[in-house]
Image: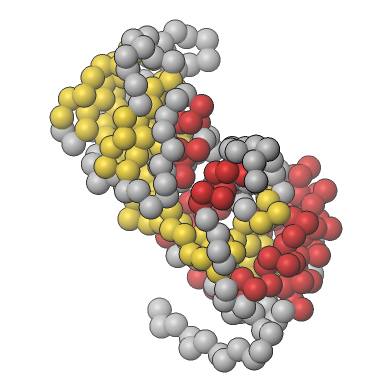
Amino acid sequence: MPQTPARSKSHGESHFSKVALIGKFLAPSLASSAGVLEDIAQFLTHLGCQVVLESTTAQLSGISQYQTLDVQGIGAQCDLGLVVGGDGTMLGIGRQLAPYGVPLIGINQGRLGFITDIALDDYQTVLKPMLMGEFEEDRRSLIHGHVMREDKCIFDALAMNDVVINRGGTSGMVELRVIVDGHFVANQRADGLIIATPTGSTAYSLSVGGPLLHPSVPGWVLAPIAPHNLSNRPIVLANAVEVTVEVVSGRDASANFDMQSITEMQIGDCIKVSKSQYSVRFLHPKGWSYYDTLRKKLHWNEGGS
């Protein structure tokens, strides 16, 4: 579809014409955040943006004075998504909007805020220059996973953080056969296995001893969860490979994508994981540094200068 030529911007007017506001996907959280969303919408309008609300956000918040669009509509019509919530909110909408290439800015209304990095109290000061075009762009790779049963795909999804194959809640360990680009790696007995992107290397993978990967590194972390053999350690792989994980034994196994999409796996099922053709576009304040984020969120050098 041909793009409409961008109209010229006057001094003090936003670089982005149509901005989608996206809030938390939990009704109690959104109801209590309605005032915050309305304040942000008015701020954007004052800067010359046309504001739309993501349809679920509008429904759960009760805000009705703005146009609403579903994810497909946002992808087709908006040139910026402004996510007000926590990292989970950003993970969910980021996966959905990745095929459309819509850039995202995150205002943190959650707890940690690794990828929603603008503090809610500072949003007006930080957001205004970004909307005028002063920002750093940061692209994050995605994983595409296909769960296979008897050579048929029964489930597929994208993940920005990780794909996790888990044992059942009441069963013992699972045994997983791991193959990388057709090469047998090992049969692993563990509580599960994590395949994490650089974005996900600060999440679940980190808690099981996986390394941190800079977002620019074209790699994945393959990290076992509570392995039976303690010499079974995390390994960094190139993200150009295909990883196949087969459930050899164990009951009630499952595969989940960013802890948001989940499907059960039976013995003999396998999941094939490869790099997605899509990536997520994050916009950060000018001068943003990944190392600053690590230092702040992981409390490095506490008490130092």
Residue in view at x 76 percent, y 78 percent = 46
Residue in view at x 42 percent, y 29 percent = 210
Whether residue 234 is visible to the viewer of this picture, yes or no, is yes
91 left or right, relative to 46: left
Residue in view at x 60 percent, y 38 percent = 301
Task: Answer above or below: position of 38 versus 188.
Answer: below
Front position in the image: 272 or 106: 106
- Count of all numbered marks drawn on residues in the image: 0
175 left or right, relative to 35: left
Residue 90 pos. (x, y %): 58, 50
Quadrant showing the N terminus: bottom left
**Image quadrant in which you'd find residue 219:** top left
Task: Answer above or below: position of 78 versus 3.
Answer: above
Front position in the image: 300 or 73: 300
Of all residues shown, which one is farthest toward the left? 183
**Image quadrant in which you'd find residue 250:** top left
Residue 229 pos. (x, y %): 33, 10
47 left or right, relative to 82: right
Whether residue 62 is visible to the viewer of this picture, yes or no, is no
Front position in the image: 82 or 302: 302
299 left or right, relative to 208: right
Residue 118 pos. (x, y %): 66, 56
Residue 6 pos. (x, y %): 52, 87
Task: Answer above or below: position of 133 versus 270.
Answer: below
